[in-house]
């Protein structure tokens, strides 16, 4: 297109589009990621994302399984400083291999979400434990129902596939998340998820390790995104493939992440609980002082009176901190929601 034609098109566009610059990319690249007809996505581009760390025993099988059920998808393997031949095996299997040097699954997910461009994202582990055969139906449901995330809830058939400690920890953490945020998923630690583009491109990944699944779940709950959960088969790891999840160490990190996210997303309740505890302690200490003062007119334990005053002030400060931070959180949530709404729903083309 020549410069004169470009100016004519720009002149016919709304002023807001020209200010935002949203029309200019479409002029340079008029074809969207998938073919669109009548405002609906007919052939979505699909990206399969496989974060890997020392998975040479299983990554080729994982790539082959997803290639068989999603033949048009681009399959990415993101290696996270593997010390074995994961990179070579994945490349030989036909995957697009990239590397993330910052250690931790959260860092890998951050890099994948930032670098890969698609209409639908399928994320799984590279250990061949998730049922790739469930992916086409999950992708179709995401598009048909215009969802932003589908969680593949794991159903294991053998005890070796899912360790008992992990099962108990998952149930406990899921219950805690439901109590903190009002609703939850039945398997918040599942690494098998289908995402829309607007979820991926509006998600500011902050986690470093395995707590990333918790952060993903909280992000969906916070913005009240349309989501679903589908039971999928979960099988035992292949020989030579070892789990990198530490039941206790990563469990404590995940619990700490939940507490941090609760402090950030529910500041009134978080600081209100602290204020309530401080007020209760101050009241317990103040009652004897009040009784003594009523009987004698004296305050013999002056240091205790000072302590009660300090506790009362701290309680009041926590109340005001919670109220101020709640306003900040509300504004931040509005900004995140607006960023989320800048992208079309799955199955819809931008008008």
Image (cartoon, helix red, strand yellow):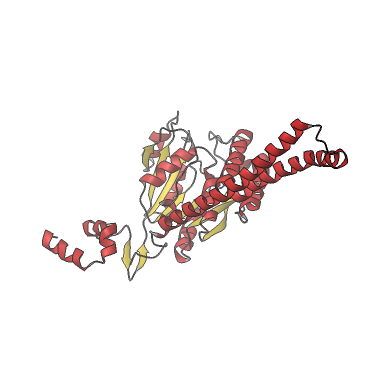
**Residue at image coords 64%, 41%:** 166
* Placement of 87 over or under 228, stated as above or below: above
Q: Is residue 178 visible?
A: yes
Visible residue check, residue 157:
no
Farthest-out residue, bottom? 38
Q: Image quadrant for the C terminus?
A: bottom left
**Residue 87, image quadrant:** top left
Quadrant of the rendered image containing residue 33: bottom left
Residue at the far top in the pictured view = 83
- Of the pair 250 and 74, the residue shown nearer to us: 250
**Number of marks:** 0
Q: Residue at x 11, y 62 (%)?
A: 4
Instruction: Kindly give the residue lying farthest to the right in the view shown.
Output: 295
Q: Nearer the viewer, residue 172 or 207?
A: 207
Q: Is residue 233 above or below residue 104?
A: below
Residue at x 49% of width, y 60% of height: 137
* x then y, percent, for residue 133: 50, 54
Q: Position of residue 31 (x, y in %)?
A: 26, 60
Q: Left or right: where does residue 28 sit relative to residue 333? A: left
Taking depth in this image into account, of 139 and 207 the one nearest to the observer is 207
Residue closest to the eye, 80 or 91: 80
Where does residue 341 sit, x and y in percent of width and height? 41, 60
Q: The N terminus lies in which quarter of the figure?
A: bottom left
């Amino acid at each position: 297109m020549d410069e004169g034609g470009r100016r004519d098109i720009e002149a016919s566009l709304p002023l807001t589009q020209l200010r935002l610059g949203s029309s200019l990319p479409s002029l340079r690249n008029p074809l969207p990621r998938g073919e669109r007809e009548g405002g609906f996505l007919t052939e979505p581009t699909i990206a399969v994302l496989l974060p890997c760390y020392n998975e040479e025993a299983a990554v080729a099988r994982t790539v082959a399984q997803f290639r068989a059920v999603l033949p048009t998808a681009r399959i990415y393997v993101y290696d996270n400083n593997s010390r074995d031949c994961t990179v070579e095996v994945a490349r030989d299997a036909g995957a697009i291999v990239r590397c993330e040097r910052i250690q931790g699954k959260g860092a890998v997910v951050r890099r994948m979400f930032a670098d890969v461009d698609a209409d639908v994202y399928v994320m799984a582990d590279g250990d061949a434990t998730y049922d790739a055969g469930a992916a086409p139906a999950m992708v179709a449901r995401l598009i048909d129902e215009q969802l932003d995330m589908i969680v593949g809830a794991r159903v294991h058939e053998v005890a070796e596939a899912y360790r008992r400690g992990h099962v108990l920890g998952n149930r406990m953490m899921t219950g805690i998340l439901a109590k903190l945020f009002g609703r939850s998923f039945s398997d918040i630690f599942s690494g098998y998820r289908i995402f829309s583009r607007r979820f991926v491109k509006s998600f500011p990944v902050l986690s470093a390790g395995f707590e990333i699944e918790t952060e993903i779940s909280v992000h969906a709950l916070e913005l009240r995104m349309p989501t679903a959960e589908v039971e999928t088969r979960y099988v035992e790891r292949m020989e030579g493939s070892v789990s990198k999840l530490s039941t206790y160490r990563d469990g404590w990190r995940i619990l700490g992440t939940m507490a941090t996210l609760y402090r950030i997303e529910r500041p009134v309740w978080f600081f209100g609980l602290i204020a309530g505890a401080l007020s209760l302690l101050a009241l317990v200490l103040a009652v004897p002082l009040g009784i003594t003062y009523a009987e004698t007119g004296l305050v013999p334990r002056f240091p205790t009176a000072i302590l009660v005053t300090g506790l009362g002030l701290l309680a009041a400060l926590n109340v005001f901190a919670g109220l101020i931070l709640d306003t900040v959180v509300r504004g931040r949530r509005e900004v995140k929601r607006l960023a989320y709404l800048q992208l079309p729903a799955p199955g819809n083309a931008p008008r």
